[in-house]
Image: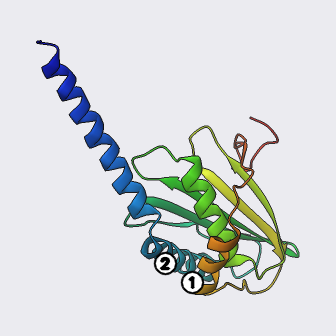
Amino acid sequence: MYWAIPAILVAVVAVAFLYGRAAHYRRIFSPAHFEEVHSTLLDLLHRVRASAPSTGEGPAEPSGAVTSAGLVLGVSHQISGDSQVLHISLSQHRHPTTAAVANRFGFFIMSALNRNKLSLDLFFTDSGVHHLVFVGGLGDLANNDFAVAFETYQSTYRPLPFALRALGADGQPTEAA
């Protein structure tokens, strides 16, 4: 009979935990949050491209932001010879970055930038940060407005093949972790 009180307490704690996680994921995957991510991404892209060295060589000053739902976006941009490299990092503030979050927002970012002819390298590191590295020719980066990017994401979403990699001393990914 005395076991009933601890069992009820455990059940209440479990339900509260699950309810909290469900509320977190409802917020992070809400259309309003996708719109915030789109706006934040465009702002970060503008900032890093505006801070590019005037010589055209070397990396621009990286820029980052945390959304209201705790998604951390980091963006860097570099011009190297006749190509540009756009590096976008995704992680969750105060939470491990789940595959669901990385896949869905990674695909959404691809939907926002799919007007460009860019190759893409997808990987994640031991720290749980997921990276999208776009490489392509010089020129302005075109982006889809939110409505187009969100519709593309909703109608064509599929999980992304992120691979585990380590980052070398130069900050570049190695072939295998």
| Amino acid identity at mark 1 | Phe
> How does the figure colour the protein chain or chains?
rainbow
113 up-or-down from 13: above or below: below
Q: Position of residue 103 (x, y in %)?
A: 63, 56
124 up-or-down from 157: above or below: above
What is the quadrant of the C terminus in the image? top right
The extreme right residue here reads 82
| Amino acid identity at mark 2 | Glu
Q: Earlier in the sequence, mark 1 or mark 2?
A: 2
112 up-or-down from 123: above or below: below
Residue 92 in sight: yes
Please report contact status of discs 1 and 2: CB closer than 8 Å, yes or no.
yes
For residue 168, side relative to residue 14 (left or right): right
* Numbered disc 2: secondary structure: helix
Q: Residue at x 21, y 22 (%)?
A: 7
Residue 51 in sight: no
Q: Residue at x 57, y 57 (%)?
A: 90
Q: Residue at x 82, y 41 (%)?
A: 175
* Numbered disc 1: secondary structure: helix
Q: Residue at x 84, y 77 (%)?
A: 117
- How many marks on residues? 2
Q: Label 1 crowding class (10 Å Cα cut-off): few <14, some 14-19, many 20+?
A: some
Q: Position of residue 156 (x, y in %)?
A: 71, 70
Disc 2: which residue: 35
The extreme front residue here reads 1
What is the quadrant of the N terminus in the image? top left
The quadrant holding residue 80 is bottom right
Mark 1–mark 2 Cα distance, whole angstroms, equals: 6 Å
Q: In the image, which disc is placed on residue 146?
A: 1
In depth, the one of 78 and 153 nearer the eye is 153
The quadrant holding residue 44 is bottom right
The quadrant holding residue 119 is bottom right
